[in-house]
Amino acid sequence: MELPPRWRILRDGPGAGAWNMAFDEALARTCRPGEGVLRTYAWSRPTLSFGRNQRARGVYDMESGRTLGADMVRRPTGGREVLHDRELTYAIVLPLADRRVGAARELHRLVGGALVEALRALGVPATQASDGIRAPHPDEGPCFGMPGAGEVEAGGRKVVGSAQGRFGGALLQHGSILMAPSTLSLSALRAAEVVLQEQVFEPPSGIAGLLGRPPGVSEVRGVVEAAFAGAFGGSWEVGQARPMERDAAEELMARNRSVEWTWRR
Amino acid sequence: MSEIPSGLHYTEEHEYLKPTDEDDVFLIGITDYAQGELGDIVFLELPSPGDTFARMDVFGTIEAVKAVSDLYCPVAGEVIEVNQALDDDPALVNAEPYGEGWMVRLRVTDPDELEDLLDEEGYRALID
C-alpha cells in the first residue's frame, strides 16, 4: 500500500454522534491525493453506533435511548454495535493510489500495530489478535464482545474496536480506544424481547482498569499520534478542518439524523 | 494464483460479467482475486429486480471483515434477478465467486459498452 507523504492531525473535542459520523465520512469523501488525515475526538453524550449493515430494528430500542439520554446513530462503516462514552475515538483517512483491493486489510494491520505501540507506551500490555479468527457477521453481537483478526487486545479483552469504509478513492478506518466502561449498559438499550434471550454482555474495563488509574485524554491522544506517525511515516502537522470538509459533513447530517438511515435494518 | 476464467468480461473494479444462455444477459460478481483480497465476506446489500443502473452507478455494497465497499455497475442495464442465496450465505462469494457466488443477473442496455471491458489477459495484467 502506497502511503501519503503528508498527514494532517485534527484534534476535536466531544461531538454529537450524527456529526462525528458525518465528519469522518466527509473527510474520506473529500480526501486529497498525497494527504492523509488522523482525527481524534470524543462524544458529547453516550452514543450507540450501529454498523452500516447490522440489524438494529427489533434488537435495540429507540425509546430507551431517549429515556436514558443516549444517542443512536448508524456508522458509514462496517462491523457491529459500539457504545461510545468514555473513550478516545480515532479516524484515519488516506487516499488510495491504486485500485488494489487489499489496501483495507493492510491498513487494518498497520493501524492495529500502531495502536499496540501507543497502548504499550502508556503501560498497557497490548497485543494484536491473531489472523486466524473468522470475521463475524454484523449481527453477531457487540463489537467489544469478541476480537477480530488483527484487533487490539489487552488483559484478555479487546480494548480498541475498529471499522472501515471505502469511499471512491479513499479509505476510512475509525475506532474506539476504550478508556473506561460506559456509565450505561448495552442491555439497558436493548429491545425488551432481546434482553430476555441473550447472555449478559460484560463490558471490558478499558485502559483505566488495566492501568489502575484513569488516563487523561491528552495523554492518550499524544501516544496515539506519535505511534501513528511512527508507523505511517511522512510529515505530520496539526491542522484545522477545511470549509469543504465541514460543508460535506453538513450535507450528510440530514441522513445521519434520520430514522430511515439509523434504523434502516 | 487467482483464477481468471476465459470467456468473461472483467473490470478494473474487479468485477466480472459472465455470459448466460440469453442474449445480452450477464451474471455479475466479483473476481476470485477480489474475494481473496477482501477476506471473509459477511454481508451483501444488493438491488431489486427491475432496478436500472447507468454505467458505474453504485448498485450495492459489500462488507468484508468490517470494511464496507461500494459495488459499481460495470455497464448500464436492468437487474432481472438477484442471487437470494447470498442473503443466508454471503461466504458463497468467497467459495465460488464465478459459480454460486454470482450477485445479480443484468440485462445490458448497450452491448457496445462491453467492448471497453477487459478480457482474461487484460485483467491478469491488471492484478499481476
Image: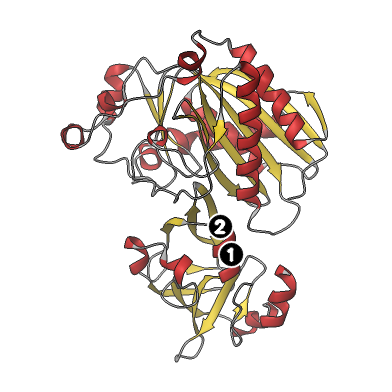
Residue A254, given in percent of the width and then of the height, sits at 47, 35
Quarter assignment of residue A239: top right
Quarter assignment of residue B115: bottom right
Dot 1, crowdedness within 10 Å: few (<14), some or many (≥20)?
many
In this picture, is A235 found above or below A55? above
| Viewer-closest of A173 and A157 | A157
| Viewer-closest of A2 and A66 | A2
**Mark 1 in CB contact with mark 2 (< 8 angstroms):** yes
**Could you say which disc has been placed on residue A38 in the image?**
none
The subunit letter for the residue under badge 2 reads B
Q: Are the numbered discs 1 and 2 placed on the same chain, yes or no?
A: yes
Question: Disc 1 on helix, strand or loop?
Answer: helix
- How far, Cα to Cα, is label 1 from label 2? 6 Å
Name which residue type carries label 1.
Answer: Ala
Dot 2, crowdedness within 10 Å: few (<14), some or many (≥20)?
many
Residue, x 44% and y 29% (percent of image)?
A: A156
| Viewer-closest of A183 and A239 | A183
Quarter assignment of residue A109: top right
Whether residue A122 sits left or right of residue B108 in the image: it is right
Residue, x 53% and y 48% (percent of image)?
A: A131
Residue on which the image places disc 2 = B38
Residue A81, given in percent of the width and then of the height, sits at 39, 35
The subunit letter for the residue under badge 1 reads B
Residue, x 70% and y 30% (percent of image)?
A: A228
Residue A67, given in percent of the width and then of the height, sits at 27, 18
Counting the numbered discs, the total is 2
Residue A252, given in percent of the width and then of the height, sits at 53, 37
Whether residue B65 sits left or right of residue A233 in the image: it is left
Residue on which the image places disc 1 = B34
Extreme top residue here?
A213
Residue, x 69% and y 75% (percent of image)?
A: B123
